[in-house]
Amino acid sequence: MVAGAAMLWGLWPVWLHASSVDGPAAAFTTMAIMSLPAVVVLRRAPFADRGAVWALVAVGVCDALTAGLYFTSVNRGPVVVAVLTHYLTPLVVALSAPWLLGERRSTRALVAAPLVLGALAAMLGRPEGEGVVGTGLLGGASAFTYAGIVVGSKRAGKSFTPIQVTALHAPISALLALAVFRGDALPTSLGLDTGRAIAGGLLSGLLGTILFNSGLRRITSSTASTLTYLEPVVSALVGVALFHEPFSALTVVGVGVVVGTGVWVARERA
């Protein structure tokens, strides 16, 4: 389930790359769509666990920040830089999860993070275009907020179901995005680009997040975050297939390293 979610998230460049819908508008649209099930699950949500409630609030804040930062980095700068800096997340989770959640420290996750980042760097190639530094800063900031989503979702999932975690944090994210970005968070038209953003919200946003939260209940946050390295692999393959980005032997090797490392980490004994 976590791997499936990561592959759905890897389709974000399809919805966002070369689109007139900027990061804040795409983030707000996604969060609004993810909020749709909230009407159904609200009455059944357990609010007695205060720690889970505050974790849910933290997920909402972090998700809004992550979407705004990452979507903007993908939209404005080299996709390679955005992806690599964003995927410092598994390393941040592996270091923080034992302290924040009391999980066992995953040696394999700590080894895997720099190994896979190196494979991704080789696979995605040398960044081209302007805005490398700005894109790197946005992507790096999104790595820390993304780690907050993983850790917070794990804690909230102790009391809330996967669809409740997904649907109840999303209104917080949508309202925060609207409060921060105001008019920039609203799509300016209902054209093809907005339709792509809506499709992304349904598939990569709503469905992907429900799958991720379902899998996160069964494995550690360090393992889950390592498996999300499948997202940049899919993004790279999408770039080759749809955006005519170069395909080389390094791409094949990089995909093999990422997938093989993910299996290795997932099979670590509890």
Image (cartoon, rainbow, N blue to C red):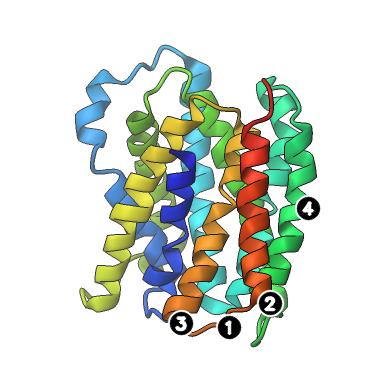
Q: Are marks 2 and 1 in contact (CB under 8 Å)?
A: yes
Kindly report the distance in space between the C-alpha atoms of the residues bearing marks 3 and 2.
Answer: 15 Å
Give coordinates of residue 57: x percent, y percent: 48, 34
Q: Amino acid at mark 1?
A: Pro
Kindly report the distance in space between the C-alpha atoms of the residues bearing marks 4 and 1.
Answer: 24 Å
Q: Residue at x 60, y 48 (%)?
A: 145
User: Which numbered dot is residue 114?
Assistant: 4
Of residues 105 and 177, the one drawn nearer to the viewer in this rendering: 105
Callout 2 secondary element:
loop
Mark 2 or mark 1: name the one nearer the start of the chain. Answer: 2
Q: Are marks 2 and 4 in contact (CB under 8 Å)?
A: no
Q: Which residue is mark 3?
A: 243
Q: Amino acid at mark 2?
A: Gly
Q: Residue at x 56, y 61 (%)?
A: 232
- Residue 27 against residue 103 in the figure, above or below: below
Kindly report the distance in space between the C-alpha atoms of the residues bearing marks 2 and 1.
Answer: 9 Å
Q: Amino acid at mark 4?
A: Pro
Callout 3 secondary element:
loop
Q: Which residue is mark 1?
A: 246
Of residues 185 and 55, the one drawn nearer to the viewer in this rendering: 55
Give coordinates of residue 220: x percent, y percent: 60, 28
Quadrant for the C terminus in the image: top right
Kindly report the distance in space between the C-alpha atoms of the residues bearing marks 4 and 3.
Answer: 27 Å
Q: Which residue is mark 2?
A: 125
Callout 1 secondary element:
loop
Q: Nearer the viewer, mark 4 or mark 1?
A: 1
